[in-house]
Amino acid sequence: MSQRKDINAEAQSCERRREKNISGNAEAQSCGGRGEKNIKVENSISKEIVDSAIEAHRELKGPGLLESAYEEALCHELIEKGMEVKRQLTIPLKYKGRILDTTFRLDVLVENKVIVECKATTEYNKIYESQLLTYLRLLNRKLGLVINFVEKYVKDGIYRVVNNL
């Protein structure tokens, strides 16, 4: 919840700066150096992901299944919407210029921009958000969602994680 407040406060601050500023370049620099278009793209993708997660949860009759079932249903919904989806993506890990034997695996990458980590656990742990933030940093992505499908209403199990957005 505090991240949402931070994001809203930043957006309002950027909007005030835009109203005072006429130059487009100065606007982008004063709002984190990223154009509004890029932010809208990632936010638009996240909206589609949330809508698809709700539909998958509803269609699968709520909580009680394995994470893999929700992940597959979510991906099906996103593909039906015409989105590019990569599942169980193995990512090499670089350390001091060397590729390690150890890799990590993303649950879902949507439109090559937003990372989604699917969970189905009654014991939600904030470490999932920390893990997702690390993935965002390693892949130089800005936005990710942890979706815990075990909630009665999946909207209550969605956690937005940002990396310098």
Image: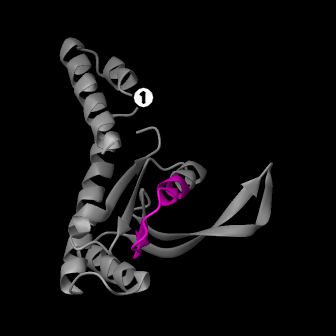
Amino acid at dot 1: Gly
- Identify the residue position indicated by label 1 in the image: 33
Q: Is residue 1 above or below residue 90?
A: above
Rendering coords of residue 132 (x, y %):
50, 57
Q: Secondary structure at mark 1?
A: loop
* Side of 30 where 92 appears, left or right: right
- Residue under the image location 24 percent in, 78 percent down: 57
Tell me if mark 1 has few (under 14), some (14-19) or many (20+) residues whose alpha carbon lies within 10 angstroms of its own: few
Answer with the quarter of the image where residue 92 lies: bottom right
- Relative depth, front residue between 6 and 75: 6
Q: Is residue 119 above or below residue 162?
A: below
Answer with the quarter of the image where residue 15 lies: top left
Rendering coords of residue 67 (x, y %):
41, 81
User: Quarter holding the C terminus?
Assistant: top left
Q: Is residue 123 magenta?
A: yes
In the displayed orientation, state which residue is furthest to the front: 123
* Side of 123 where 70 appears, left or right: left
Rendering coords of residue 135 (x, y %):
55, 56
User: Quarter holding the N terminus?
Assistant: top left
Q: How is the image coloured?
A: one colour
Q: Is residue 127 above or below residue 38?
A: below
- Relative depth, front residue between 142 and 150: 150
Q: Is residue 12 magenta?
A: no
- Relative depth, front residue between 156 and 9: 156
- Residue under the image location 78 percent in, 63 percent down: 100
- Counting the numbered discs, the total is 1
**Region rendered in magenta:** 117-132
* Side of 84 where 37 appears, left or right: left
Rendering coords of residue 146 (x, y %):
40, 62
- Residue under the image location 33 percent in, 34 percent down: 6
- Residue under the image location 21 percent in, 70 percent down: 153
